[in-house]
Image (cartoon, helix red, strand yellow):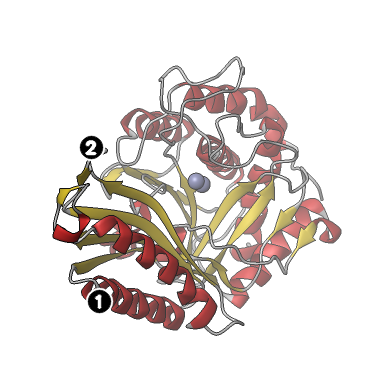
Amino acid sequence: MPIENWTSRYLDELKEFRHDLHRNPELLYDVHRTAQRVAARLREAGVDEVHEGIGGTGVVGIIHGQSRNSGRMIGLRADMDALPILEATDAEWASQVPGKMHACGHDGHTTMLLGAALGLVESRAFDGDVALIFQPAEEGGAGAKAMLEDGLLKRFPIQEFYGMHNRPGLPLGAFATGAGAQMGSVDEIIITIEGRGGHAAQPHATIDPVVIAASLIQAAQSIVARTIDPLKSAVVSITQMAAGDAFNVIPQTVTLRGTVRTLDEATRDAVEAQLRMLTESIPAGFGATGSLSYLRHYPVMRNAEIGVERAVAAAGAVAGEAQVNSEMAPTLGGEDFAFMLNERPGAMIMIGNGDSAPLHHPKFDFNDDVIPWGCSYWTTLVRQRLPLG
Ligand SMILES: [Zn+2]
Ligand SMILES: [Zn+2]
């Protein structure tokens, strides 16, 4: 059974809704307008409970099934936040806020979950409860964690979590997922090298932190090559350098920033330990000091095997088995849905966005034709996970 018929009745409204979110992008926890629009439409549709302000600006809608004999509840999650990027599409619905845009398609994710709510509340063809979770701050703010810390699981006895993200390059109507570690841990590193500044013409009277930084950057690249098991995955990227204010002054300090990505905790620990050793020992060898601040942002995102089986069954029912890749290769991109999957079994599935600019690109746009596929996936998943007696 392909795209579900009910979606056609809401498609125009859902496209309009998506375009409105796209015109009015909001960042991190500052998704007040988006959250308010979602909550208002859920209430208007007759969703049984609508809770706002969870984890700052998160929204949770609860829909009761025709029967509730199972006593079960599953959680479907969408993200609502945009990115600090100046949009370069010429879409009619392009961002009206300079420097902010929906470049990751979260406008589409929110719209598809809202669409699913409209279908579910109408048919209620399931036994149990569905929690629709609209979270803020996926893009670096750990909104999923904030919602959990604000009592998401205490207030709503969710037993399984499912997420969905669009994927450029994956054909429209296709899905992909995989069991185990699917997305990388996301850590931030800040290295400070303290030397001794002075006149650029008298380097012997200084301890030049710029030269030390160059050595440290080179050495950091040996961590993956020479410390980590070649069959494991890790990335160490130094992405920012700050040093000096004048061409003729050797600065006192250099600050380096960057990111570390891995697919398992042991590798993550090993990279941190080695980076700490290099940060302390290399500057010391030059008579300077180095310090590392290692900030663990998102854990590795792991799909439960059983979660993947269930996601694949639902996607297969919508798109046909041939359109569902159940053995997707992992990536080292991050996803804060990891926090939810660390609490309950479930899975994140990728839904094809067709040919489009890549995620986080100024020309990216969510493909409206994905909406009925995503809505159908959600409602099929609910019927399969909470079958009527
Ligand atoms: Zn993103
Ligand atoms: Zn995203």
The kind of residue tagged 2 is Ala
Locate residue 2, reporting x and y percent. 80, 47
Residue 3 on image: x %, y %? 76, 43
Q: Which mark is residue 19?
A: none
Farthest residue toward the right? 322
Report whether 99 appears left or right of 160.
left
User: Which residue bears the numbered disc 2?
Assistant: 246
Residue type at mark 1 is: Gly
Left or right position of 179 against 248? right
Q: Earlier in the sequence, mark 1 or mark 2?
A: 2
**Which residue is nearer to you in this view: 153 or 84?**
84
Residue 285 disc label: 1
Work out whether 164 lies above or below 180: above
**Kind of element beneath mark 1:** helix
Closer to the camera in the image, 345 or 287: 287
Q: Residue at x 51, y 25 (%)?
A: 87
Residue 215: quarter of image = bottom left
Residue that appears at 61% across and 26% down: 15
Asked whether the viewer can see residue 155, the reply is: no
* Residue 389 placement (x, y as % from top left): 63, 66
The residue drawn where x is 73% and y is 67% is 326
Question: Does residue 68 appear anywhere in the picture?
Answer: yes
Residue at 61% from the left image edge and 77% from the top image edge: 305
Neighbours of disc 1 within 10 Å: few (<14), some (14-19), many (20+):
few
Q: Give 78 or 256, whichever is nearer the viewer.
A: 256
Q: Is mark 1 within 8 Å of ligand 1?
A: no
User: Horizontally, is 233 left or right of 191 in the view?
Assistant: right
Which residue reaches farthest top? 92
